[in-house]
Image: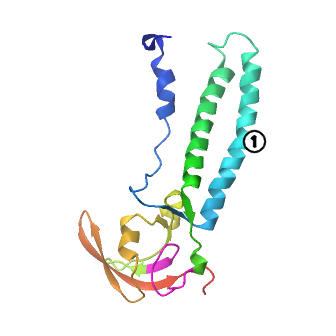
Amino acid sequence: MNKAFVKESDRDDDDDLPEAQALPAGTRNYMTPAGYERLRDELTQLMNVERPSVVQVVSWAASNGDRSENGDYLYGKKRLREIDRRMRFLTKRLDIAEVVDPATQPNRDQVFFGATVTYLDTAGETHTVTIVGVDEAEPLAGKISWISPVARALIKSREGDTVALRTPGGVEELDILEVQYPGQG
């Protein structure tokens, strides 16, 4: 079919999902064991449960005849594209993942991937963050990506150090109060 006759909405459906955070060129996709398991479980769920269910609905809807005004068919096809896109993304991320178990970190007095760091900012506020992989980051839950500006400022520092965080408003100093790793108490 000529592209001139393809409806605009059909081509744009693939662009509705937000882009995942890209990894910097030449870096590894570090992940905690829990983050790796979560992504693998999501891929398994999509592959073994959701996709077969949607395929069944689309197959049933297609058998009903006219597909041009069949909501189950149209929505099902769109949902299949979304599932397939997410499965491709998860497969690529899991293929390049390098699982790092923070519990096995030998330098527990220094900040590295997987550390939970408590720091004091220049406003006098105390923050606690855990440095995790790009696909595991949940800033509102205190989990920040290892490539985030705060994590980059904290990496390799020790308890009692003061590090500089470059922000759009200027340089801010962060005082490291505590460094912990899983299994440490």
- Is most of the magenta stretch helix, strand or loop? loop
Q: Position of residue 182 (x, y in %)?
A: 60, 79
Q: Secondary structure at mark 1?
A: helix
Residue reaching furthest bottom?
160
Graded by Cα atoms within 10 Å as few (under 14), some (14 to 19) or many (20 or more), the crowding at tag 1 reads few
- For this view, does 166 lie left or right of residue 54? left
Residue type of the residue flagged with mark 1: Val
What residue is rendered at 56% in x and 70% in y?
100
- What residue sits 47% from the left and 34% below the top? 15
Residue at 40% x, 58% y is 26
Towards the viewer: 127 or 184: 184
Expressed as whole percent of the image width and height from the top left, the position of residue 146 reads: 45, 66
Residue 61, position as x, y percentages in the image: 73, 19
- Which residue in the structure is indicated by mark 1? 49
Left or right, 99 with respect to 145, comes to right
Residue shown at 48%/83% (left/top)?
179
Q: Is residue 7 magenta?
A: no
Q: Pick the quarter of the image with the C terminus.
A: bottom right
In the image, residue 108 lies in the stretch drawn in magenta: yes
Question: Residue 63 appears at what percent x and percent y?
Answer: 76, 15
Residue segment shown in magenta: 105-118
Q: Is residue 54 above or below residue 69?
A: below
Direction left: furthest residue: 170
